[in-house]
Image: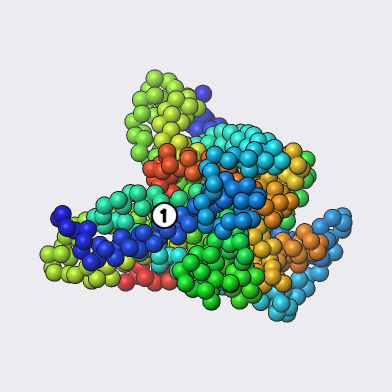
Amino acid sequence: MTYNKQKILIICSFLFIPLLLLATFTYYPAIKLIYYSFTNWDGYSPEKPWVGLANYREVFANSDIFKVFEHNFAYFVMGIVQNIVAIYFAIVLNSKLKGKYFFRILLFLPYIMNGVAVAFMFGFVFDTTNGSLNLLLSNLGLTHLSETSWLGREGLVNYSLASTGLWRFMGYNMVIYIASLQAIPKDIYEAATIDGANSMQTLWRITLPNMKPVIQLNLFLTVTGALEVFDLPFVLTKGGPAGASQTYVMRVIDTAFAYNNYGLASAMSIILLMFVVLVLGFQQLVLNRGGDK
Amino acid sequence: MRDSMLKPINLLKYLTLLFGAFVVLFPPYVVVINAFKSTDEFNNSNSMALPNSFLNFDNFKTVFERGGLLSGFGNIILIIVVALTLNILFGTMVAYVLGRFSFKLKPVIFAAYLGATVIPSITTQVATFGIIKGLGLYNTMGAPIILYIGADVIQIILYLQFIRNIPVDLDEAAMVEGASLFKIYRSIIFPLLTPATATLVILKTISIYNDMYIPYLYMPKQSLGVVTTVLMRFQGVNSADWNLICAAILLILLPTVVLYLFLQRYIFDGVANGAVK
């Protein structure tokens, strides 16, 4: 067989199953989702009555649905804090410091832990009466704080949950930031030192600008991650108290599987997808403008 | 240099690092000490007090016997082995084709993998659920396996980086000796990708082991529980017995923590390479 024929054969046979998987489990469901979003299908009956844009109108008219995004906001705030903390530790652990490898290993540790186990672990830490956080606070003399119901108060529950996310993923961001720091050429720093720049100036003028693409990538992941939060509240609070920690994706899943309203759930999914694409597009715009200079 | 540790800036660095270490270790510490307490002891002591003995393994025994944790470990290991074998095979195949040949549809295929990352997989589950049911895989191990075997864009980028570093001369030398393109993949490319594969095996093992959603949704059957779903069921029944739940949490955290401590360098490399490049 000639190499040209072999090439065609290899391309076709090697890509067939992988592309079939990609089409079946990513693109086909996405297209199906668009179709469902124009129907009021209940999830099991054979007919899927076409309703046009009614589902979309309902989502936008029903302020109750969009209000859920307020709960997601806590995850966004904590995500920003998480990135700032991660950049700080990345810079510290990239400098000359004894024991930096030890601290790197330690701070990354939560990331590899099982999410459900971590959720239950924090369920125990946050527990109002048995919990160790309140005990710790009272041992520190902060008695007025030590009776807080961390997962039981409406204004607080989302921040408590989101701080669990911060605990778990800060180290992951930190490792990515360390990698990006190490990619900055050393001679830029040498040149800056010769020019007499102090450490604050090097941080603002060299380190942070050079980290920009990675910071932007992480911010994109933070925003989309905040929009898509699901497992933490699902495992830890089931959306309670009184729906105060229900996130948008939980609401979608409930609408589909608990209320059998697949059509509406699909429309909600598509709207979320649009938000994600919007964030990505916005970021590309900002990124490209920054690149023109 | 000797007194560099005492410089104020370094002191500040160490203080924040110690605070970070405390925050990271506090929750696991609490879980560890309470996992060794009997129910009486737990009720009569506070949650930060050390247990009477670190040799009281009763809770762990109870979790194994009542919780079905053993079959949970068995199931997840089976899923990981089968899914990863196929995943690595498909991942290297796609990377070989995209890395070594040029053809018209190549950019389209790469864009298709890239575009897939934008779609939040949790939102498409409504439709995916129907496909899994239609294939007759609902409530079988086939469901998670088939959902895990697809290669993702990060995996492909990682492999492509390695393939670029394998000299094309090697392929050409093999061709001169009459080797087929399949043979080049099998005896040159695949073996030389081993370092990348090793990193991916570690990262994917951890992510499959830690996944809650796919086993929860697609394998509700009792006998098909994996560690995460077993833990969820166990907590549901014993929600008041925190000492037992702590033991269960500890047993489930242990394997990945041990794996991590031995292989942390490769895990760091994998995470950094996947995200930065």
Q: Is residue A114 above or below residue B93?
A: below
Q: Is residue A51 above or below residue A31?
A: below
Which residue is pictured at 63% across the width and 73% down the height?
Answer: A153
Q: Quadrant of the C terminus of chain A?
A: bottom left
Q: Is residue A283 left or right of residue A188?
A: right
For label 1, the crowd category at 10 Å Cα-Cα, with few meaning under 14, some 14 to 19 and many 20 or more, is many
Q: Residue A251: name its quadrant.
A: bottom right
Q: How is the image coloured?
A: rainbow
The residue where tag 1 is placed is A107
Location of residue A71 with respect to A41 vertically, above or below: below
Res. B271 visible in picture = yes
Q: Amino acid at mark 1?
A: Leu
Work out whether residue A130 or residue A6 is closer to the camera in this orientation and state it.
A130
Residue at 63 percent across and 47 percent down: it is B38
Between B24 and B264, the one lying in front of the other is B24
| Residue B102 visible in the shown view | no
Indicate left or right for A156 with B103 as reference: right
SS at mark 1? Answer: helix
Left or right of B41 in this view: A176: left
Q: Chain of mark 1?
A: A
Q: Nearer the viewer, residue A218 or B225?
A: B225
Residue A72 in which image quadrant? bottom right
Residue A277, image x, y percentages: 56, 65
Q: Position of residue B121 (x, y in %)?
A: 63, 55
Residue under the point 54% across and 49% down: B51
Q: Position of residue A133 (x, y in %)?
A: 53, 64
